[in-house]
Amino acid sequence: MLEYLRNAADKPVAKILMGILIFSFVGWGVAEWVFGLTSSDTTLMRVGGDKVSIQTYSNFKSNELASMSREDQRRIYTDPTAMTTFQNDVIHKIANIKRLEHHARDLGYTVSDRKVADDIRAVPQFQENGKFSSAAFDVVLRNSGLNESDVANDFRMRTLNKMVQTPITAPIKTPKFAITATYNARNSERTIDVATVKFSDFKVATPTEEELRDFYTKNPHRVPESRDVSYVMLATKMDKPDEYEKNLKIAQAIEDDIIGGETLATVAKAHGAKFAHYDNVNANTLPTDKVFDNAMFARIFDMDAETESELIETKDGFVIVRVDKITPEHNAEFDSVKKELATEWTKSTQEKQAYIQANELLVDLNKTGKLANKKTMTVSRVSGAAPAILVAAFKNPLNTNVIVPDTDVFYVMHVDTEKSPKIDDKKMETLAPQVESATGRNITADYNTYLEREYPMKINEKTYNRFVK
């Protein structure tokens, strides 16, 4: 092909072919430029139209990590779930800051350079003998990797945020009627009539084999996915630098031996580490072993069979875990759960008969206004009857008739009257700040919702997947 082009470079056909090839190579770059596929786009997200770069995210993330304890940092770096949560929290914190910045700009708020300079001079870390020191300021900037512009912008943003948020966070004087309404709602009492229909009051015959099999078809017993798991652990005091460095080298040697084909049990014995093995590990039968915390459990169930993890740093030492075998979720054999099925069938049958009787009582109550075998009681929101009754008593309006389901019982209930509590001035005084605090939280939540709606966040999925995920 190329020889043909060289020999016929001046022919029209050759020129056309060469043009196509040239356009193809150039087109790759042009397409990136036209369709926004260029790798130079480092925008992570837009908040209300404002761009937030991946560099801004990285700086904020570094500052957040620097403020954490070493143990929290290690947990984030060793637990993928914790890392994902942390990264998303950082993104949302940046978004919230940008919303406040955008809103301050829309409101026309400004912060003078003089104000920024005064705030910087007032920071104790930038002072020597109670006065601002350029040398101390330069040291802090050099150690943090920031420049003067970064610091000035940060202080300007803090002031703008305070200007926007101060009116929202100002103390709220709640009207007395609101406090009284809350007091009455908390302390009022209701008189109710209740008839109890217990499942155990109904006698049922022993189920037949056919009935049990039919019941199992409709209510199968599922055996959850389980895994046979092994691990080798080199116990280490992670907060002791010398021991940490020494055992890290041993742990890396263990990892190399495992990669070389040695079993976990063999390398554990060779290096003086702990070896453990557990069969059928699942959410319901988690071993009583401190290695198996929630993060480790999530990691294990994200691995394939016959694979080992990388070297994991935990608060108690270095761990490598292996999933030896995976048993998928499946239906239990009928004979293995037959006893449990008989118990469940009996309770289910009793429940159906109890509901029929409770419904008959309710029909009579609605028709005649009378409730057979009733018990009249006065209840508050926290006492006087079973929790299910209390919830239903205050959830439903007065003069309501309802069936209330509970464990092993149905209650047929009539909500009769309500009695307002006697006003206690001391309790009202104690309640006032609680109501004011709740009102303040509601206003703040509404305001934040408004900002989220006014300045929506849009993630650049391509940048997120390349640099964050």
Image (spheres, rainbow, N blue to C red):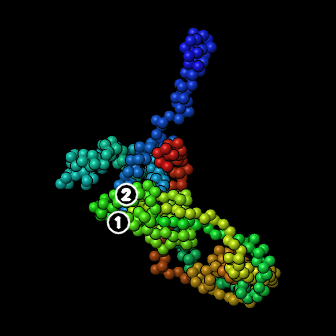
Q: What residue would you read off at disc 1?
A: 236
Instruction: Report the amino acid beneath label 1.
Output: Thr
Q: Distance of mark 2 from mark 1, alpha carbons?
A: 15 Å
User: Crowding at label 1, few (<14), some or many (≥20) Cα neighbours within 10 Å?
Assistant: some
Q: Position of residue 248 (x, y in %)?
A: 34, 59
Q: Is residue 402 visible?
A: yes
Q: Pick the residue in front: 276 or 245.
A: 276
Please tell me whether residue 207 is drawn above or below residue 98 in the rendered image.
below
Residue plotted at (19% across, 52% down): 128
Specify whether 139 is left or right of 58: left
Using the rendered view, name the quadrant where residue 185 is placed.
bottom right
Please tell me whether residue 173 is drawn above or below residue 165 in the rendered image.
below
Q: Position of residue 65 (x, y in %)?
A: 38, 55
User: Crowding at label 2, few (<14), some or many (≥20) Cα neighbours within 10 Å?
Assistant: some
Q: Pick the residue in front: 89 or 378.
A: 89
Residue plotted at (62% across, 83% down): 386
Please tell me whether residue 212 is drawn above or below residue 250 in the rendered image.
below
Instruction: Report the amino acid beneath label 2.
Output: Ala
Residue extending farthest left: 129
Residue plotted at (43% across, 55% down): 260
Q: Is residue 105 visible?
A: no
Q: What residue would you read off at disc 2?
A: 253
Q: Looking at the image, is mark 2 or mark 1 earlier in the sequence?
A: 1
Circle 1: element type:
loop
Residue extending farthest top: 10
Q: Quadrant of the N terminus?
A: top right
Q: Position of residue 170 (x, y in %)?
A: 43, 60
Circle 2: element type:
helix
Residue 430, label in figure: none
| 2 vs 1, front mark | 2
Q: Position of residue 457 (x, y in %)?
A: 52, 47
Q: Pick the residue in front: 150 or 113.
A: 150
